[in-house]
Image (tube, rainbow, N blue to C red):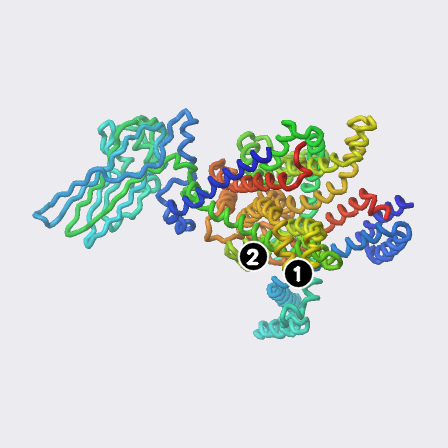
Amino acid sequence: MKKLLALVAIASLVLPFLPNGIYVAVPVWIALLAIGYKVNKAFTLHFLSRLLDAFIVLFVVLIITVAMFGGTIAQIKKQMIIDMVKRQVASNPQLAQQLGPKIKEYIQQTAEKLIKAEGLDKPWYMNLPMYLSSVITLDLKSQVLTSNSGSRLVRDIVMERLPRTVLLFTTATIITIIIGVLLGLLAAKKRGSIFDKIVTVFALVTASFPMWWVGMLMLELFSYELNLFPSGGMTSVPPPKQPLAYLADLLWHMALPVMTIVLVSFGGWAYVTRNILLGVLKEDFVLAARARGLLEKTVLFKHVLRPSLPPIVTMMALSIVASLSGAIITEIVFNWPGMGMLFWEAIETLDVPVILGLTYIFTLVFVIAMLILDIVYAILDPRVRKG
Amino acid sequence: MSQKAGALGVIILAVLIALAIWAPIQYGKYYAYWRNTSYWSLYPKAVPPDWVSLFSSKKLPPTIFLKPSNVTQKSLYHGLAKEITYKFEVNFNYDEPPNDVIFVLNVKYQKPPAIMIYVTRPDGETVKILQGSASSLNNVIQINNDQSVKDNIYSWLLSKGLNVSSPSAIVPTDAIFCKLSNGCWNNPQVLKGKYVFTIKMIGLGNFTAKPLVDLTGKTYGLMGTDVFGRDIFIYVMLGLPYGLAVGILASVIAAFFGTIYGLVSGYFGGIVDKIMQRILEIWYSIPALPLLILAAIVFRPSIWLITVFIAIFAWMGVGKVVRSMALQLRNEGYVVAAKAAGASDRWIMLKHVLPQLLPYTMAQVALGVPGAILTEVGLDFLGLGDPNVPTWGWLLHDANVYGATVNGYWWWVIPPGLMAALVGLAFALIGYAMDVILNPRLRER
């Protein structure tokens, strides 16, 4: 029953992406929550409270953003209206002929009327709902940047970049977690050994390195000196046509940035995992398990690693915060055409709508990642799962 | 192990602080030249440090600033005119010619004197480099970019019977410093020995001059130069006080706020604690860098404001640690006793709970410094920091913008990042040592 429910819940996440799917999705979700409440009250409540948190975070970030950029958004919206009126006039030669020399006056007057009608002449806090909605739906025109297809809608520009960042960052994070947790396990098992000390020192040293700086050095060494990896970008130009060749090309371009992120992050992971495991190792039940004569391997995996997983997941959430900011800048160094690179381009050209959209999407991705980790935590922690 | 680590951290930090005090005293005047590229025009552009010669089979010429070794003054036409001759001697024993030779004339006059510049080579050849009136010559002459220098050297090479096609094929420094042969003007075998540059000025009436000759080298200083000619060592050192100050200040502000927050939250417990922890967790889930970027774009802040911004997104860790400690301490006997004696909450928090927490706060301050420095360096790298302050992040920003990685200017990339890492490491070591001492669970058995 529980597993079925979970499967249905995951499957329902596809719904909003279907045409008009949101109207199906909302009732389905409410129904799921209701059933979930019946089946497992504690878990559902935990989930709901985290969902609320996520919304609060998004809302706070949006308010801060809009408060800082309210004036600029108003400017952009006004410009959009003026452009629209101009286009209307241009597409209507009869009207243009009729107006003759008064055409500028007409455009200005019409635009002013529309601006007044939309309330754009009022201060930003009066227009908060409108600004919020235009950031949430990413319904702003960029000032300079365009998407690959030539669209100037922020939604198109950002959505084109989002999968690339997710691809790079997720790959690197998964590799980091695997290496980090395994090394942490080994270090905890052999605590006080040379290996343990090396892990600790490595963690301390790499934690102080700016990730993107390491990226610059990696580029210089592996790309320009040794010519082993490409110097940036996501694919060769032009990209290979065959799917397999394309994949290989992509992986080849991903190798250096992924190596950079992993190299800088896994030490910290190993160290934190080691500390959490050391705490558990001192518990009485571990002593008891050993006293019963269980194999060291069984003790480590069944009695030590299992109760350590929830705090490790918590650490995951925190370290992802740290490495995500590093990853933004790392993309710039490697010319990886993701959201971080877009941030750089938008800053260089001071393209405010794109910056707003990026901040919003970053927060959204971030909040969703945290939410997923929270759910994983709840599943791993029997106190939350069983209620 | 933790004690050794802590001691190492303290030693590194002490050295860094000493350097941070020494650098502004020694190089303080260079703060003004940070964005002044014309000041650095006398320096070679993007050359590696001097010590690369040690690892090279060739002995590369460093940058040499020459002062006149000999000044002679003659009066001509019964004192109506005078002639001043400045001689600049240099023993040039390197395997490559200099990058460029720069003459700075610094002439002050009523009537412009005539100026002649020539060089006497170790083989006795005297080559005219430039001739002209002080009013027609630039004050700073870079011979490799000067057409009339090329013309002069062209005619000299022709007079030696060499087969040179046109003046534009000549690299003047290569021609001046080469063993004469066909093709030596752009692919030279260096003629080693004593070179004497002579600047002769003849003029009516009174004039004064303070000429300089500068052989810009293939290497420079301890850490080389960037594409503007700026001395990277100087600016890495001048960035140190700012790096330390930003890291420590941001961390201290964050720890101060976090301690108060955690103290109140943990001490009162109950509903207050619940609400405050919820706020803290929400704050945790706000991605700091995008918001810092926004703030930097809107406010164009000074470096100190940036420090405060960084602290705003860094206090939560301290808050959490302090709160969990305060939760335990509030049930201790002496706290209960103080309460029974009628002490106010504020008194108990400040006098009984806070002192117990301070060591943990200190550890958190140390552990927070690396993160604060990384954030600041990152913001500068994005070009959003305070442009008037020479920081490591700005050095790396410029390195990235001017393609230091593409061109292999490693001396421009490594030192700033390494310094940031070193400061971070010192505090990480200290924080780690304190953490292990304070946190018995981490102690090795």
Q: Is residue A41 left or right of residue A362?
A: right
Q: Which residue is mark 2?
A: B297
In which quadrant is the N terminus of chain A drawn?
Answer: top right
Image-quadrant location for residue B20:
top left
Q: Nearer the viewer, residue A220 or B422?
A: B422
Q: Which residue is mark 1?
A: B343
Whether A58 is drawn above or below A115: the answer is above
Q: Nearer the viewer, residue A364 or A316?
A: A316
Image-quadrant location for residue B444:
top right
Closer to the eye: label 1 or 2 = 1
Q: Secondary structure at mark 2?
A: helix
Residue type, mark 2 in image: Ile
Residue at 67% over, 57% down: B338
Q: Is residue B409 left or right of residue B291?
A: left
Residue at 31% over, 41% down: B102
Residue type, mark 1 in image: Ala
Q: Which mark is residue B87?
A: none
Residue B274: x percent and y percent?
74, 56
Q: Nearer the viewer, residue B378 or B3?
A: B3
Please, which residue is most extreme toward the top here?
Answer: B57
